[in-house]
Image (cartoon, helix red, strand yellow):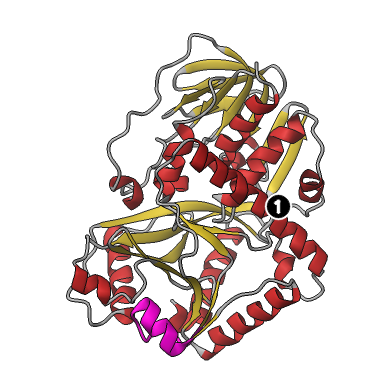
Amino acid sequence: MKSLGVAPAYRSRSGWNALLPPRIAGEQVPTARRFRTVIIGAGYTGLAAARRLVELVPDEEVLLLDASTIGEGASGRNSGFLLINPGEPSANAAGFTEDWAIRQMALVQAGLDWLRLLVRTHSIACDWEEGVPAITAAATAAGEKSVRATRSRYEAWNVETQEFGSEELRRTLGTGYYRYGIQSLTRALVQPAALHRGLADNLPAGVTLLENTTVSALSDGAPFRLQTNRGEFVADRVFITNNLHARSLGIVRDRMIGIYTYGAFTPELDEAQLNDLGEAPGWGALPAHRMGTTMRKTMGRLLIRSGDSYERELDPDTVRAMLTRLYRNRFPRMRTHEFEHVWGGLTAITQNGAFAFGQIRPGLFASVGCGGAGVVRGTIHGKLLAELACGSQSMLLSDRLNQAGPNWLPPEPFRRFGATAQIAWEQWLAGAER
């Protein structure tokens, strides 16, 4: 038996989830204690894997466990950008072939298409918006150089993207903070907690979802025995889709680190304040540097996301002060710079940005290491993981299996020293992009 760690106890509710009506968590313990498949982790990856398993094997009995409540985990704490950027890090390096980039985007596009179909089929109210300005915006000369280089790569892949000059950005976003931008490869903007809840509440009949259920130990082989706070369950096979917590099982233990990032929502703004946030009724702004600041104008509010910390969540007052400063820098004319909700979210980062994906050993499958891109990418990875387990074959699965896995990371304390130094260095490089 290997012991699992405890899921993160966040200091604050997800702002996205706090804006939604109350929801009753699925906590009715099933009478059955043995299942064909148990999935640990009901984020986008786990939900997709469960759904696809039942599609492929209609009489499949799947138990889907989550240590948190749907909408309150990392899946409900992101910024809601559904992007189709090439997933492998070498997509941004010299020598990365156009063909491979296009195949990577096709992989993510398949996840987006499936999500769109599910949202429409089940009438999931998640503020799904396509065609909204979702701009990668640069505030510095270095940032502009980086964004222009990104646009050149897109052109090499035959992907057209709109350019924005400083005046267009000022009109669209309501701020003169930025000097250059391009329409990102964001294909939709969503309310992530609402999407997460909608997918979980419309699972097929063969899936039993059990929330607030922590797995404390897992046996090494089939039949797998899972010790939980709700008793023992037995499974013929197990899927690990709980990202960072896979380390407690010895899965990619030396390949992932945990990074907290932070977001805040303003209160609902009046018409005059919304007009100060630009002409567009809604928009998204992504940073030119990965340590930069993300923003959205949505639901009559401003969302701002920034800041990174290694493995430990910052104090909410510290986060509020940081995000208030970044808000004021961009919109100094706003009447107030207060926030109604401030929260953090934990994501699993690998050194080279690659997922760990596939069969770890007989009967044990995993897809972890989302790198903060789990909505679309996690969805397609969960779907393909189910297909792999069922023996299905496709070009998408072949392309996924041909990707490199995550690189090795040094042990603690060297890992912490390296990660914190890298965060500080990248934040310095980001400069005014923060």
Which residue lies at the image location 36% right of the left edge and 59% below the top edge? 314
x, y (%) of residue 341?
27, 56
Look at the image and give the residue range highlighted in magenta: 165-180
Image position of 381 (left or right of 275): right
Quarter in which the C terminus is drawn: bottom left
Label 1 is placed on what type of residue?
Leu
Along the viewing direction, whichever of 374 and 80 lies nearer the viewer: 80
**Residue at the disc numbered 1:** 107
Q: Nearer the viewer, residue 423 or 298?
A: 298
- Residue projecting furthest to the top: 31
Q: Is residue 205 above or below residue 388?
A: above
Q: Is residue 24 visible?
A: yes
Question: Is residue 404 depicted above or below 330 in this figure?
Answer: above
Q: Residue 181: percent from the left, percent from the top? A: 52, 81
Q: Image quarter for residue 248?
A: top right
Would you say residue 407 is visible in this rendering?
no
The reply to whether the magenta stretch includes residue 273 is: no
SS for tag 1?
Answer: helix
